Amino acid sequence: MPRPARFRPALSRRARLGAATVATLVAGTAVFGIGQATAEHSVPRTDKEIPNLTQVQDKIKAYYGDTVTADGEHYASPRSNYAHQVRGIEAKARTYLSKALAQHGRTGKQTKPAIVLDIDDTTLLTYNYELQVGFHYTEESQDKYLAHTDMDPVFGMDRLVNWAHDKGAEVFFLTGRKEAQRAWSTRNLKNVGYGVPLDRRHVYLKDKEHPPAYLPCGATCTTIEYKSGTRKHIESLGYNIVANFGDQYSDLRGGAGDRAFKMPNPMYYLP
């Protein structure tokens, strides 16, 4: 978020619920994830190639273990298949980071180890918002929601992030949310348990009005250009990004990072 040129393949052909563990390569970086979303851009030849919209939405709700409160709010269940898959990714990440951070300390490198994380559906779960708006994102509805509501942390990610920070990793958040949403975003991260620095040096948001000089593409950056360019900037400050976390492949492509972890998200696709 925000989501320029946002596709909804979960409402067409991209949902791959309950997929097995996937290991692939993105721009030379190992990527580990489960239930990753993809997008198909071919034009359907007949209606039989398009799944029923209502059935896809029902599968998404079942995957997240849809739980409805008395006042009609929707939340994901910690016992859902989604939560189970997220915990599997986090376990792999913790095992990797334990070794990577320990090794980094032994090598005497001048750089400081760091991890970079997207926000929406990587560290904060948008499921309640998505159900409120019927999977129909708009900047206006997102602003209204974020101004007054804290999203829950993605199951276990707050503990993983705090643990990595305690082990010596500098933590950076890199999101496509707009700069005007900074106060809401940092408030939310703090309120749900992310006990790491959340100042401007550690939380990067997209500023189209005043793009940073280190991004040659300026206000016209694609998601991949913006995120990879910002990661390269972080590394230029003396950090070695040992792990990069995101729910979209556009969060992970473009280099700058030793290992990438793909979080599951069948709700939307961002190129």
Image (spheres, rainbow, N blue to C red):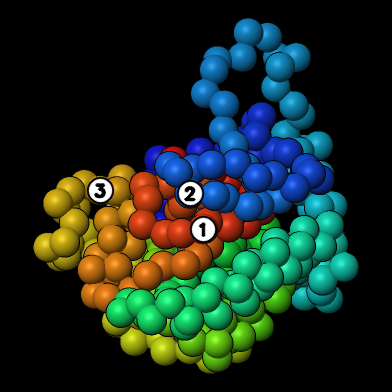
Q: Secondary structure at mark 2?
A: strand
Q: Which residue is mark 2?
A: 29
State if disc 2 and disc 1 touch (CB < 8 Å): yes
| Image point (54%, 71%), residue name | 100
Q: Residue furthest right?
A: 79
Residue 194 x, y percent position in the rendering: 55, 86
Give the quadrant of residue 69.
bottom right
Q: Which mark is residue 161?
A: none
| Image point (43%, 42%), residue name | 27
Residue 20 x, y percent position in the rendering: 79, 44
**Residue 134 in sight here:** no
Residue 66 x, y percent position in the rendering: 82, 61
Q: Secondary structure at mark 1?
A: strand
Give the quadrant of residue 81.
bottom right
Q: Which residue is mark 1?
A: 259
Marks 2 and 3, the one that precedes in the sequence: 2
Pick the front one: 166 or 1: 166
- Amino acid type of disc 3? Cys
Crowd rating for badge 2 (residues with CA inside 10 Å; few <14, some 14–19, many 20+): many
**Spatial separation of the CA atoms under disc 1 and disc 2:** 6 Å
1 vs 3, front mark:
1
Q: Which mark is residue 221?
A: 3
**Residue 269 in sight here:** yes
